[in-house]
Every structure is written in C-alpha cells, then in structure tokens.
Image: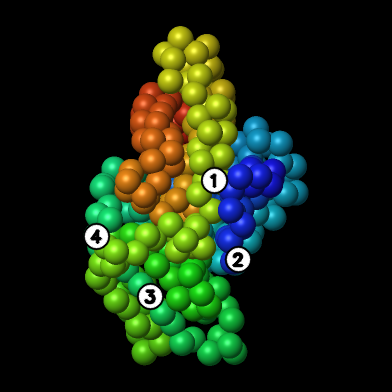
Amino acid sequence: MSRLAPDTPTVHHLPTIRIPGMNAPQDLALSIFGAHVRKPGQKAWSGGLVTLMGDFGFSVEAARTALNRLVARGMIDRHREGRQIYYFVSAEGQEYLAEGDRRFFTFGKTQQRADAWTIVWNSLPESSRQERSRLATRLRFYGFGPIQDATWIAVGDREPEVLRTIQAWEIERYVAMFVGRLSRRIDPTSMIATAWNLPRVAEHYELFLRDFGNLADPAQRAVLDDTGAFVARTQMVHRFRSFPTIDPELPEALAPQVYQLRARAVSLFDTVYDALEEAAERRFTLVAGGL
C-alpha cells in the first residue's frame, strides 16, 4: 500500500490497515457460505465449492485446504451422502455469520452521535495473548480504535455489542467500559488520528468505488452471465465486509471526506448486491447446490 500523503501529520501509533483480499481462500469461502448457505437444511456440494473457488483463481488443493480448515475451526460441518461430500454451516458458524450480518447490513445506515463515545479498557494478562488478540479484532469490528495499550475508543454508544461479546466469552472481570461525552472544549482531532488511519480508509473507499462503480449501471450488469454475476457480487461482498473493521463511522462533522465516500460505497453496495442476487444464486445452485 502507498504511504500517507506528505501533508498528512505523522502520529505515533498510527494504525496499519490490512484488508483481506481474494488471496485468502478461507475468507472467500466464508463469504460464499454467508451469501448462499444460510437457511436451515441448506448445504453445498464439495466438488461444486471447489469449482466456484476456481472462478477466483484458486487451485483444487487450495480450495480443499480452505474448506478443511473451516471445518477444523468449527465454522462448517460436512457429511457424506453416498460418494458425495456436502458442507453446511455449523451452529458456531451460524452465530459467527449472524453477528457479522448485524454489523455488516447496518453499516453506514445509522448516524452515530458525536456527543456519545464508548471507552473500553481491558486487563487481560499478557499470558492470554490469544484472548487479547481476539478481543482487539472484535473491537475493531465494532468500530473501536486503540488510543493506547489495552484502551479502545469508539464513537456512539457501543455498550450492547461489547457486553454481548464479553459476556459470551466470560471475560467481564477483565473489562471496564465507560459511555459518555468528550469535552466540548478540546479538539478530538489528535485522538482520532491516533486511533484510526482515516486517509487510508478514504483510499480504500475510493478503490472500492473505482472497481465496482460501473456495476451501478444496469447496462453494465446486463452483459454479465451468471458466472460473471456470481464472481462480481462475491468479490464486492468480500471487499465491503472489511469496511466495518477499518471505518469507525465518525459523523460528517469529524470526518467529512470519509463520511461522503462511505455513503457512496453503501449506496453502491446495496444497489449491486440486490441487482445481482438472482443471477449469482443461479450460478451457485447449479454448481454447488445440494442435490
């Protein structure tokens, strides 16, 4: 990724942004399951899933390895019917995807109040590195950014989401949370720059709009066959699902450029996601749908 523009102030602890690309087969497979294998009783044929992942350039070996690893993580289960193997989303996977949907499909559609902020501090011991990392990942997903070690801040009241997580993980005794307002007499610009890399967030929105903006045109979508629709829609979902992790949804007054780019990206996503659904579902059902 390119460096920040020369006129962007250098801030200590400026966060690095990494967005999963199509080179992450497990993430891609989860995107496919999330879009097409969610209803009770739905399943996907293993050979068909391998074929679909081949549409994105993955080898048979890479696709099968990704599916096996998702099984090992508990995200999906498999069962055999005769000589065929089918996959379906496990109970743990359904919970994981449902939590993602709550954030994913409301992202950019609610106005966060600049006078309400949430601060989370944790005292998880250094020996619990996996738990600390897991909590950090979830907090980023909820729009939090780090302002110092073990201290995270987010705009708006994020108490319900954080409570749901720490209670499910049984780590309440290690976490403190405050919900309140910032001083109106202190400019939050420096704190925001410490917690989030907004110039890079804007860059990723611009790339998203560049790469998928043509699909807002019905004529451009009309030239896609079912395979093209499936690939384009899956790629778009895969890219868009990373935005809740990097964009804190600051209100327009605090981040006008990102606010406007976010609004354009959300509008584009909603339009294309719905418009390509029927063709993408036909491709998935034909190739990998449970028989």
Please give the name of the residue rendered at 43% of the width and 42% of the height, measured from the top-left corner. 258
- From the top left corner, tell me how far across and down residue 285 is, in percent: 47, 33
In the rendered view of the protein, which quadrant contains the N terminus?
Answer: top right
Q: Amino acid under label 1?
A: Pro
Give the CA distance from mark 1 to mark 4.
23 Å
Of residues 69 and 161, which is closer to you in this image? Answer: 161
Secondary structure category for the residue under label 3: strand
Can you give x and y, in whole percent of width and height, for residue 213 in the image? 49, 24
Identify the mark nearer the N-term, 3 or 1.
Answer: 3
Residue identifier under label 2: 12
Q: CA distance from mark 3 to mark 1?
A: 24 Å
User: Rounded to the nearest whole Å, what is the CA distance between mark 3 and mark 4?
Assistant: 17 Å
Please give the label number shown on residue 199: 1
Give the mark, 1 or 4, whose residue is nearer the N terminus: 4
Q: Is residue 24 above or below residue 180?
A: above
Q: Secondary structure at mark 4?
A: loop
Residue 160 shows in the view: no
Q: Amino acid at mark 3?
A: Val
Q: How many marks?
A: 4
Q: Quadrant of residue 90?
A: bottom left
Residue at mark 4: 115
